[in-house]
Amino acid sequence: MRVYISQLVETEKIKPILEKYDVGLEIVLFASPYCLDRQDEFIETYKEELGDLYGKIDISIHGPFVELCAGTRDELIAKVSNYRMQQAYDVAKKMNAKYLVYHNGYYPNTYSYIEWMQNAPVFWQNFLGDKKDDGIKVHIENVFEDDYFILNELMEEISDDKTSLCLDVGHVNAYSKIDVMEWIKILNKYIKHMHIHNNCGDRDSHLGINKGDIDIIEILDLVKDKDITISLEITDLDELEESLEILYKNGFIEYRK
């Protein structure tokens, strides 16, 4: 298991954490279409902000997701979705990223299961068709799904050595009545990445790992020996540092040498 942190605060605030802990960085900046359209400029600025850390830490990218839809019935929306996702993939290649996260984009009760499964696998197969040999892993993330069924079916259609699931445990706890341990049990063979944060089941709070009602340590104990990456998606800087120290004390990460 390899641990990353999702960058949800300014680079100058995250650098001391990256210098202290031996973790990678999941960059969220390029989820923004504004940054994607000016990607070369923002890549260079980002490299300057990271300074000596760039090239020393593992980097990965969270792709765009707002208003994008892989299962859409509208060809124009599919084209825009493909275009934005390709831009993020270009960023990942330019920054030698290890992996790239995209949202599945399914909203319950807006599409029938049958229609979604007619469209989404075709979208992903077309998008990934010319990307099989470059070493960048692609993880498709749950958000509003209230059941694991559609993700399991999607992975049966498209999963391979390159493409797998990102299981966001906070999203499961906030939007599904099915316990996260059951999600892990059913989707286990497809999960290669996880987003880790906590909440109290009422909303997507992105709290520190010890601040909600999910037993994060139990989950990490379950997957620690797997070939898997996890990223802490915690919005509060103090809670992020507290969570990393908990992971250190439990033997999941080490201090950077």
Image (spheres, rainbow, N blue to C red):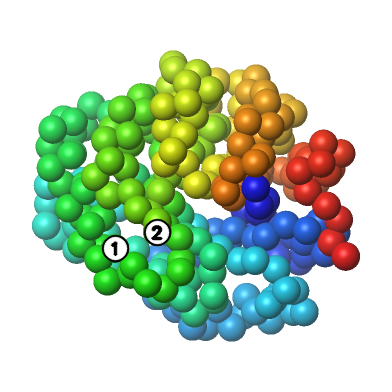
Question: Which of the two residues, 145 or 122, is positioned nearer the viewer here?
Answer: 122
- Mark 1 closeness class: few <14, some 14–19, many ≥20 residues within 10 Å: some
Residue found 40% across the figure and 69% down from its top:
89
Q: Is residue 169 left or right of residue 235?
A: left
Q: Position of residue 226 (x, y in %)?
A: 59, 43
* Quadrant in which residue 247 is drawn: top right
Question: Which of the two residues, 9 or 177, is positioned nearer the viewer here?
Answer: 177
User: Amino acid under label 1?
Assistant: Leu
User: Amino acid under label 2?
Assistant: Lys
What is the distance, in whole Å, between disc 1 and disc 2 at their CAs? 9 Å
Mark 2 sits on what residue?
Answer: 162
Residue found 12% across the figure and 37% down from its top:
115
* Quadrant in which residue 58 is drawn: bottom right
Mark 1 sits on what residue?
Answer: 128
Q: Position of residue 171 (x, y in %)?
A: 49, 32
Q: Position of residue 195 (x, y in %)?
A: 56, 42
* Quadrant in which residue 104 is drawn: top left
Is the C-beta separation of discs 1 and 2 under 8 Å?
yes
Q: Secondary structure at mark 2?
A: loop
What label sits on residue 232 in the rendered view? none
Residue found 16% across the figure and 30% down from its top:
112
**Is residue 206 among what the camera can see?**
no
Q: Quadrant of the C terminus?
A: bottom right
Q: Is residue 173 left or right of residue 221?
A: left
Instruction: Point out the tag, 1 or 2, that comes first from the N-terminus.
Output: 1
Q: How many marks?
A: 2
**Is residue 247 among what the camera can see?**
yes
